[in-house]
Amino acid sequence: MLNTDPTTRNAVDSPYISTEHRIWQPLSAKLKKKLPQQVFQIFFADTKVEMQKEDLVLIAPSPEIAKHIQTQYLKTIQEDALEMGFQGKILAISQKIEKAAPLTNKTAQKPKQGETAYPNRIDLNPNYTFERFIKGPSNEHAYAAAYGAAQKPNSYHNPLYIYGSVGLGKTHLMMAIGNHVATAYPWLKVKYCPSEIFQSDLIEAMREKNLSYFRTRYRSVDVFLLDDVQFISKNADFTQEEIFHTFNYFYQNKKQIVISADRPPQALPQLHDRLQSRFQQGLIVDVKAPNFETRLAILKTKAEEAGMVIPNEVIKYLATRFTTQVRPMESALNTLYFTAQHEKRPIDLQMAKMSLKALPQENGVNHVTIDDILRVVSRTLHVDEALILGVNRTEQVALARHVAMYLAKKLIQGATLSFIASAFGKRDHTTVMHAEQKVRELIDVDPALQMQIDEMLEELKF
Ligand code: ADP
Ligand code: MG
């Protein structure tokens, strides 16, 4: 939409402004001068802009408006654009009906008396508390920092930045801060917000020209928990701008801000430099994958919470089976719980092994690494890892190397042939193609190898 809100003028002047707005801003300014204000409002206030290849597309809120722009204004806009040196075409289309902007009515967006002021508020999960968070060497710093922030919000490390891989308890810790503050300091306002929600809320506010309301809503809180900032895309200039300003506001007003991501700020190239440096300003803590003891403790606690009776050997089995994330452990417990109910018998090791075979991968996300593959191949085929990575061409070593490459291609999502080749110290990506081909031929004629590979696949998948 058109940016007519004077409070965002800086955003328009900023070098971070997106291409479409950089082109559209001067064009719309010219147009505004040529048209009566009301006419401009009607036809362009809710019209969004988007680059499609070389062309600038005006997306009108209805087919009628699109048609009117096409017949009445496109020519003059195109001429102005040419004058400005813009080579692409200017097009006007209509937004899809289901996505059409609701009638612009600022007051309709505001909560009525008694209504919540946070239409997009995501409730804090009451189970995500500090009491239910199992501490271990992998997360004790993050725990301590989060607990500190919850006990003394606004005066502890600000911002607090928590990072770590998926499923290691970042959201749990953030919500634990929220839950703690809400109980200990009921007069303080807490807002938990995944970054995608922040972004879509902002887009909505811009479309509705409710930016100042958006800001009041976001800035009226005392503790702001912004989850998963890795999802903010590089091109989301407005979102980055707005987070930057929101951040500054919280920082200057000594309000607590907690941010999470899957990586440290300096490893998020999609973030604009100044946002990155803001995030680096406070305390940065990480959550790592839990060690065996912590995994045992997590499993025991989760099983107890669910009222499950699980033999120790099954808990141990699960703790060996799941090494990188916590969430799949919970899924495994759920699966076991239902299997036991269904089969009307107590949980045992056999049941655990059987029922976990059918357990799908979490979100289809595969976290297998070359190291995992080397470890498993080395153990199964009795070849030293260093040999697999070396140049030795004896039959067994070459087989192990081929199998490792084959598994890497199968299991490491998004890994290209060149990536795998270089991981194995080879320059040429055709080496990997050749290895894959070789393994396929071998398993056709060698059922024993086929079985070994199946076992390795099975082991690596969990
Ligand atoms: P993330 O946000 O890092 O992806 P979550 O906070 O959503 O991970 O955690 C995934 C699941 O694992 C949640 O159900 C959470 O309660 C649980 N979990 C993760 N770490 C722990 C822990 N140390 N103690 C107890 N539960 C945990
Ligand atoms: Mg999370």
Image (cartoon, helix red, strand yellow):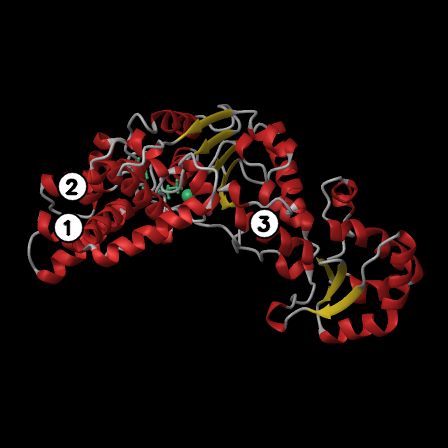
Residue wearing tag 2: 317
**Dots 2, 3 in contact, CB < 8 A:** no
Report the residue that reaches farthest toward the left: 345
Mark 2 residue's CB less than 8 Å from ligand 1 = no
The amino acid type found where label 3 is placed reads Gln
In-image side of 437 versus 427 (left or right) = left
Residue wearing tag 3: 199
Mark 3 closeness class: few <14, some 14–19, many ≥20 residues within 10 Å: many
In-image side of 323 versus 221 (left or right) = left
Residue 224 in picture, x, y percent from top left: 52, 38
Q: Report ligand 2 position as a quadrant.
A: top left
Q: Nearer the viewer, residue 443 or 43?
A: 443
Q: CA distance from mark 3 to mark 1?
A: 43 Å
The amino acid type found where label 2 is placed reads Tyr
**Dots 1, 2 in contact, CB < 8 A:** yes
Residue 116 in picture, x, y percent from top left: 52, 53
Q: CA distance from mark 1 to mark 2?
A: 9 Å
Tag 3 or tag 2, which sits nearer the N-term?
3
The reply to whether residue 36 is in sight is no
Tag 1 or tag 3, which sits nearer the N-term?
3
Tag 2 or tag 1, which sits nearer the N-term?
2
Residue 306 in picture, x, y percent from top left: 20, 48
Residue wearing tag 1: 353
The amino acid type found where label 1 is placed reads Lys
Report the residue that reaches farthest toward the front: 394
**Relative to residue 183, is residue 117 depicted above or below?**
below
Q: Nearer the viewer, residue 199 or 394?
A: 394
Q: From the image, which quarter does the N terminus lie in?
A: bottom right
Mark 2 closeness class: few <14, some 14–19, many ≥20 residues within 10 Å: some
